[in-house]
Image (cartoon, rainbow, N blue to C red):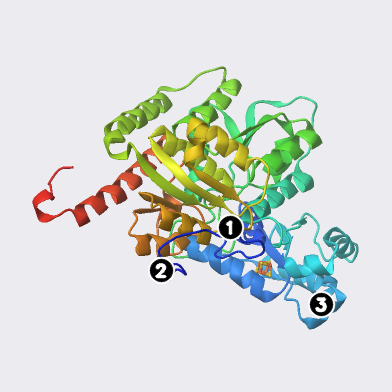
Amino acid sequence: MTLLRHTHGGTITERQALTINPAKTCQPIGAMYAALGIHRCLPHSHGSQGCCSYHRSTLSRHYKEPVMAATSSFTEGSSVFGGQANLHQALQTAFTTYEPDVVAVHTTCLSETIGDDIPQIVQKATEEGLIPEGKYVIHANTPSYVGSACTGFANMTTAMVDYFSASASPDKVAGRINVIPGWVEPADMREIKRIVRLMGLEAIVFPDTSGVLDCPQTGKHELFPRGGVTVDQLRATGDSIGTIALGPVCSGPAAAQLTTRCRVPNTVLPLPIGLHATDAFIMALRKYNGGKVPREIADERGRLLDLITDMHQYFYGRTAALWGDPDQLASLSQFLMTIDILPKYVVTGTPGTKFLKRMGEVLGDRKSEAQVRQGPRADMFLMHQWIKNEPVDLLIGNTYGKYIARDENIPFVRHGFPLLDRVGHQYIPTVGYAGAIRLLEQILQVTLDKIDRESPEEQFELTL
Ligand code: SF4
C-alpha cells in the first residue's frame, strides 16, 4: 500500500534529509550482475551474509534463475578487526570447491566503512598461494551509501578493463569492436550482438549475461552456464579498433578507462531504446563497417516507423511518469517524445551530473511542462505526490510502481530493474528497432485495456 492512498494531493514540502521509497537499488547488486556476465565467474560479496542474500535474491526474483555468489560472512569480529581473514578463507574455499576462473569481489557498506583494502588483501592471498595459477581475483568498490546499482555495474565493468584489458600489438584488429551494453536484460545483450553481426562486424560484448541468466532448460543445473565474456576476450578488448559504450552512466566509465589504458577510441551513446537512440547506434556501427546498413536492419526500422504511424492516434497528447535508472530513463523519455507522449514526471535516485542536462535536450521546448528530479529526494513518494496533484496517463518503471498504478488506476508498463512480479521480460528485448516495437505494443495494450475496462456499455466498441 502506498503512503499516499488516503490523501488528495496538495502542497509539496521540500524534504531535506528523508528519502521515501527510493528510485534506485543498492550499489553491489549492479556489481554482482555485471560480474555474472563473465564466463565462469563467481561474484563475491565482501561483507555480511545479509547483504549478499538480499542482492542474490533480488537478482533471482528478477531473472527467475539461481544466482550464485559467495560472501565473506562478516561477524562482529570482522566488523572490528577487518575482513582479511574471512576473504582469504573464502577465496580458498571458492577455488578448491567451485573452481571458478574468476572471483569478482565487490565491497558493501560495512567493509567500506571499516576501510578494508581489497587489493592489499588479494596481494597477500596471492603470496600465500590461495589463488591457483591461471585463476583471477578482480575487485570493485561499491559502498551503497553512495551511487546506486548503476554505479555498481559501472565500477565492476571498469574493473574488467583494469584487470584484464591489454594491448598485445600496436596494430588494432580490423573489423572488431568492443560493445559495452549497459545494464540491460540478457535478451537485450543478445539483440545487441545480433545487430552488430548483421552490420558485418565482430564484437566483444562485455559484460554479457545472455546465456547466463536466461539459460535454456536442459534438466541439468550448471553452476557456470555457457554464456559470459571469457577472460581471453576481455584481454583482447585492448586490441579492438573502437569501443561503443551504450549508456553514459553504466558503460561510459569502462569505455573511458579502456581508452586511457589501451588507446582504444570510444563512442558513448544513449541506450538504444526507441527510434532515435537505435539510429545513433546504427550510425556508430556504420563508421566501422564502411557505411553499410543491411536490408534486414532497414526493414526493421521501416516496420517500426509504420507502427508508430499506425499507433499515433492513440498516443498523441498523453503524459507519462517514469522512474528508475538514468540511462534507461533518458532513452525511454526520448522514445516517448517521438511518439508524442510527454514524460511529465521523471525521477532517479542515481546521482550524477549528466542526466538532467540530457533530459533537458530530450524534452526540448516542452521542458517547462515536465518535472525531472535526480538524487536522494527524487523518490517514488515525490512522484506520487505530483501524480496526486496532476495525474498522468501512463506509468513506466519497475515493480515498485504497482502500488501507485493500483491506487490511481493508471496504465502501467513494467520496465527496468527489478521486475519481481512478472515472468518473461528477460527473454524479450526492448533495445533496437524490434525492441521498440515490443515497447509500443506494451504501451498501447495497457492504454486501450483501460479504455475497454471503463467504457460505459453504450460506448464499448469492438474496434478502437
Ligand atoms: S545498502 Fe549497504 S548494508 Fe544494505 S544491503 Fe546494500 S550493501 Fe548491504
**Can you give x and y, in whole percent of width and height, for residue 188 in the image?**
49, 44
Residue pushed farthest bottom?
76
Q: In the picture provided, is 376 more to the left or to the right than 367?
A: right
Q: In the picture provided, is 462 more to the left or to the right than 216?
A: left
Q: Amino acid at mark 2?
A: Arg
Which residue is the site of mark 3?
78
The residues tagged by marks 2 and 1 sit, at their Cα atoms, a distance apart of 22 Å
Q: Which corner quadrant holds the N terminus?
A: bottom left
State the residue at coordinates (78%, 38%).
166
Q: Earlier in the sequence, mark 2 or mark 3?
A: 2
Q: Are marks 1 and 3 in contact (CB under 8 Å)?
A: no
**Can you give x and y, in whole percent of width and height, for residue 357 in the image?**
62, 37
The reply to whether residue 365 is visible in this rendering is yes
> How many numbered tags mark residues here?
3
Q: Secondary structure at mark 1?
A: loop
Which residue is the site of mark 2?
5
Q: Which corner quadrant holds the C terminus?
A: top left
Q: Secondary structure at mark 3?
A: helix
Q: Secondary structure at mark 2?
A: loop
